[in-house]
Image (spheres, rainbow, N blue to C red):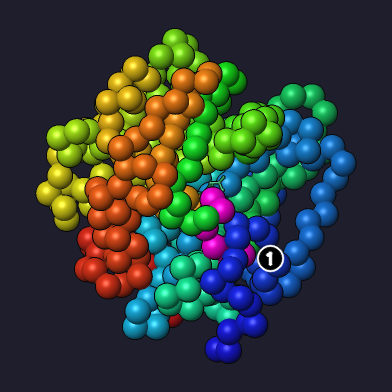
Amino acid sequence: MEKKNIDWSNLGFTYIETDQRYVSHYKDGAWDEGGLTADANVVINESACVLQYAQTCFEGLKAYTTADGHIVMFRPDLNAKRMADTAKRLEMAVFPEERFIDAVHKTVEANVSYVPPYGSGAALYVRPYLFGSNAVIGVRPAEEYQFRVFTTPVGPYFKGGAKPITIRVCDFDRAAPRGTGHVKAGLNYAMSLHAIVDAHKQGFDENMYLDAATRTKVEETGGANFLFVTKDGKVVTPKSDTILPSITRRSLMYVAEKYLGLSVEEREVPFEEVQEFTECGLCGTAAVISPVGKVVDHGKEICFPSGMEAMGPVTKKLYDTLTGIQMGQIEAPEGWIHVVC
Ligand code: PLP
Ligand code: COI
């Protein structure tokens, strides 16, 4: 199929409307058959649960063009599972996992002309989402839901691509103990908006959130998990019940251990230890791995030895191996690559 006339190499992380999206409705206890539509607008009642009580959640994954010209998605089964977990936590109707995979597959297939070409550095971002759609006024879950999927071509999440970024230790909390930090609820992002606007105003690219209970341990950023590298070359990632279980992070830890032969540790990371690390990266679908050059804690700067010019060597190896797997140049572990066409 002919590609759209888009300047693929200069895409940012912004919304560009594509041709088709998927929609399925839940009513009277069952999901309808679902299907594609060209209409990008959603019409719902003024008192829909999503509008009044933020009963909404989402997922994010990417479709890529591989070196040999196929269109593939990365581990959509894990997004399906995570959305099911999120839906249960928010008392929403669960969209069946096998139907989730079929829906993202169909949506990507219908927008193939928007999948950036191999080598452009861009990808087609796929955004499944689910929300309570009928009118409620007492605080309770909706009885009707919409599951939708749209796509949009994207470039790097942070301006400058692989250039190291500067983040600050944030005075706002992202997730409460026993709250919703471990699921992909829209409300987690609504409450991070003030913190990110403030961070940008102060000249920082992102926020480093600490654990809300003690404010002594590293959690994650607004949209990515952390990876650190120790002086002796171990890859460390924070373990916490209040962070999102990133699919990219889980994949990178596997890659670090099984492909690169590195030691890996998923454990609590005291903020005090951050100054000891040699490299720091943010990992997620949107971020891929974005290197962090500097963390600023109320004026005190922690500068990683990897510097502000380029990714550190371990981060670079992880990045190259993961993207090599995603683009089909390196053999993927069983089940990681879903071929669309
Ligand atoms: N943490 C948060 C808060 C996120 O929003 C995301 C993005 O999905 C991630 C981490 C990274 O998760 P994943 O690698 O599954 O995209
Ligand atoms: C993703 O990486 O898919 C995210 O959801 C992060 C951000 C865009 C919210």
Spot occupied by residue 91 in the image (x, y as percentages of width and height): 59, 33
User: Is residue 290 placed above or below 189 in the rendered structure?
Assistant: below
Three-letter code, disc 1: Ile
Q: Residues within 10 Å of mark 1 (few under 14, many from 20)?
A: few
Give 143 or 185, whichever is nearer the viewer.
Answer: 185
In the current view of this chain or complex, which residue is farthest to the left?
261
Q: How many marks?
A: 1
**Corner quadrant of residue 259:** bottom left
Give 155 or 189, whichever is nearer the viewer.
Answer: 155
Circle 1 residue: 16
- Determine the residue positioned at 47% across, 73% down: 120
- Determine the residue positioned at 27% across, 73% down: 329
Give 313 or 173, whichever is nearer the viewer.
Answer: 313
User: Is residue 325 placed above or below 109 in the rendered structure?
Assistant: above
Give 108 or 234, whichever is nearer the viewer.
Answer: 234
Which image quarter is the N terminus in? bottom right
Q: Which residues are magenta?
A: 152-159
Which image quarter is the C terminus in? bottom left
Q: Is residue 21 visible?
A: yes
User: Is residue 45 placed above or below 181 in the rendered structure?
Assistant: below
